[in-house]
Amino acid sequence: MDRQKKPTKPKRPKITLEPWQNSKIEPYIVLKNLSKNYDGVPAVQDCTLDIYEGEFYSLLGASGCGKSTLLRLLAGFEKPSSGKLFIGGQDMTHVPSYNRPVNMMFQSYALFPHMSVEQNIAFGLKQEGLPREEIKNRVYEVLDLVQMSRFSKRHPNRLSGGQQQRVALARSLVKRPKLILLDEPMAALDQKLREETQFELVNIQEKVGITFIMVTHDQEEAMTMSSRLAIMEEGWIQQIGTPHEIYEFPNSAYVADFIGSINLFEGVITGVTKEMVNIKCPMLSHTLSVPTNTTVPIGGSVTVAVRPEKLEIGIDKPTYKHNWEEGIIEDIGYYGDMSIYHVKLPSGQTVMASLLNLDRISIQQLTWNQSVYVSWQPENSIILTT
Amino acid sequence: MTFIKKKLLSFFSPILSVRSWVIATPYVWLGLFFVVPFFVVLRVSLSEEVLGIPPYTDMFLWVDTYVAKIIFTFESYTYLIEDDLYLSSYLTSLKFALITTIVALLLGFPMAIGISNLNKKWQIIMLLLIMLPFWTSFLIRIYAWLNLLTPYGLINSFLIYIGVITEPLRLLFNNFSVTIGMVYCYLPFMILPIYVTLEKMDPSLQEAASDLGAKPFTVFKSIILPLSFPGLLTGSLLVFIPCVGEFVIPEILGGSDNILIGRLVWNEFFLNHSWPTAAALSIALLVILFIPIYGLQKLQKIFAERLES
């Protein structure tokens, strides 16, 4: 997304909402053209990122997209092949990990098996040479924060996965770093615990006010937790934006498909008016009409994307000219709170439409093999050119 | 009839099943080649020396066709205590084994760390290089050291050539050459168990320590060292135990001043033809070795329980 000038909001002390919108605020972490190759194979390619103080930033992508390598570059476990890295205005490109104001929470938690919970957390403070009394106070402070004080004398192997995760988080918080890196923090937790922990982690982050950067492959997790996220593919950053921007304004078919589900229609531009672009798709019987936001000329091929929840599904024939199709319900996915209908069009393409199940006994009574109409508002679809 | 058949089958089924044979194999092996010989040696050590074949007294004196008198004596053991020679050579053997273990530990630990830090391809190459000498006969390797260490051998010639010394050093037939030979032979037994422990260690533990502000030496001291303790213990035992009873290396590379226990057993058997004394020496050695093995194994168990996850 382009940086736009917005009317200035009333300033609150310390916490600034959407600091990336404010050109006066300096980003806290700056990555300039950072690249990393392993024996000539690129893992991270030309990454340029600005991350602001207090952000909860997520790096999202499929496995092998380079997000973990980027995190390891930030932690100092890997040396970049080229590019620069600044934290708090200081060049950290060649600073070893033990001298960076950064702490990491590992995917495996990496708790020291020969030390108790208390010793694990105190380890970082001991390296600073703090007095024993202060170490103890600060250890119990973070243990209280993650509600693990009563387990302080236990060894990590006597803790459950969720408890180990809390200890790992406490250990990364205790040094009061400027930046905390989280490598797939929920990967080892079960679904229920994961949802609880997500909110708790965000709450803790807001309480301590430290910048968090999280690596995840779980798009839902990234959407619910982050202030902003970067989508990565094959070492490249595909798109940076708030969860809302990424979801509603994806800049490529890859991003649109990676975040949530989406219906994609390939077509050719047949007409451009002041407000609307008309597109003819070979798989659809009606033309598509989308608000102008593209520079592709008439005759150029584009992809139109519509989210399933933006599709309307009904048994009455729409009255308007564009953006609707007739089809047969091929499959229904019942999720409890909503249902996803797979509608097969005459051309053979299947589109997905989701409906909230607002009533306990659905009035619509849509069933398999029923003939239905799917339609959508022009402003709910987007043109993707790549 | 069928009932009896069934009974018989169920009685013999453990003997007939393949599974029980597989499980029994190591026990049979240990029984035949360790337990039985042990009792043979024990029995010889409790008999008296005589001239004849075999050169020791019978344990059973047949009084009647079915009644036998058991005759045994602790004379060989009291003899071991009475003569200073035995005690001092036990101590010398333990001393050599201890020095060898410590030197192997100091050399093997950094080597194991170095290997475990290489990439997979080089790890395999280095491990192969460590095990490669085993392809050559043990004796030939020891004789090779004999050649290296002689007054006009490779080492002395080289040192004289570069002008560090003018007279050849006396490198052979002393404690130095014995220690070198033993360290050389037993070093792989130190490196391999340590390497295995390091290899199993989660690499993110070291990264986590570094991330929390620990400099490389602190990472070594507070993470790598305590976590590789089980490997260090196993390696030390694997070097220490065979070194105590080592016979060939001190025989070829050693001097006449220090007589080790292996040599004494050989002397008693082949020079003095006193089988009971030789057997008693062996049994005593076993008892002496059992104490440190038992202690270290206990220690290892405690560590394993703590690290178990």
Image (cartoon, coloured by chain):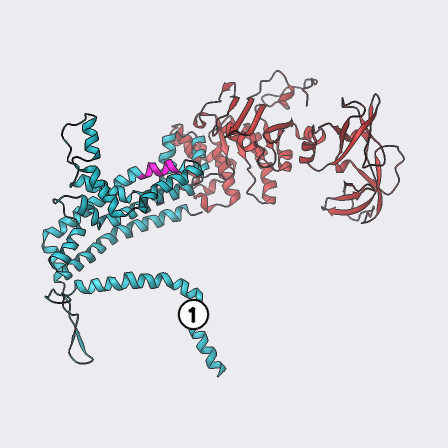
Chain colours: A red, B cyan
Q: Secondary structure at mark 1?
A: helix
Question: x, y (%) of residue A333?
Answer: 73, 46
* Depth order, front residue of A123/B259: B259
In the picture as drawn, the residue positioned furthest to the bottom comes out as: B1
**Amino acid type, callout 1:** Pro
**Left or right of B177: which side holds A380?**
right
In the picture as drawn, the residue positioned furthest to the top comes out as: A24
**Left or right of B124: which side holds A44?**
right
In the picture as drawn, the residue positioned furthest to the right comes out as: A319
Residue A317 on the magenta segment: no
Q: Is residue B6 above or below residue A78?
A: below
**Left or right of B205: which side holds B72?**
left
Q: Is residue A320 visible?
A: yes
Kindly indicate the quadrant of the structure image that contains residue B275. bottom left
* Depth order, front residue of A230/B280: B280
Question: x, y (%) of residue B166?
Answer: 14, 27
Residue in the image at 18% along x and 28% along y: B160
Q: Is residue A51 visible?
A: no
Q: Is residue B307 above or below residue B14?
A: above
Q: Residues within 10 Å of mark 1 (few under 14, many from 20)?
A: few
Kindly indicate the quadrant of the structure image that contains residue A207. top right
**Left or right of B40: which side holds B75?**
left
Kindly indicate the quadrant of the structure image that contains residue A262. top right
- The residue carrying mark 1 is B14
Question: x, y (%) of residue B78?
Answer: 12, 59
Q: Is residue A331 above or below residue A214?
A: below
- The residues colored magenta run B108-115
* Depth order, front residue of A233/A283: A283
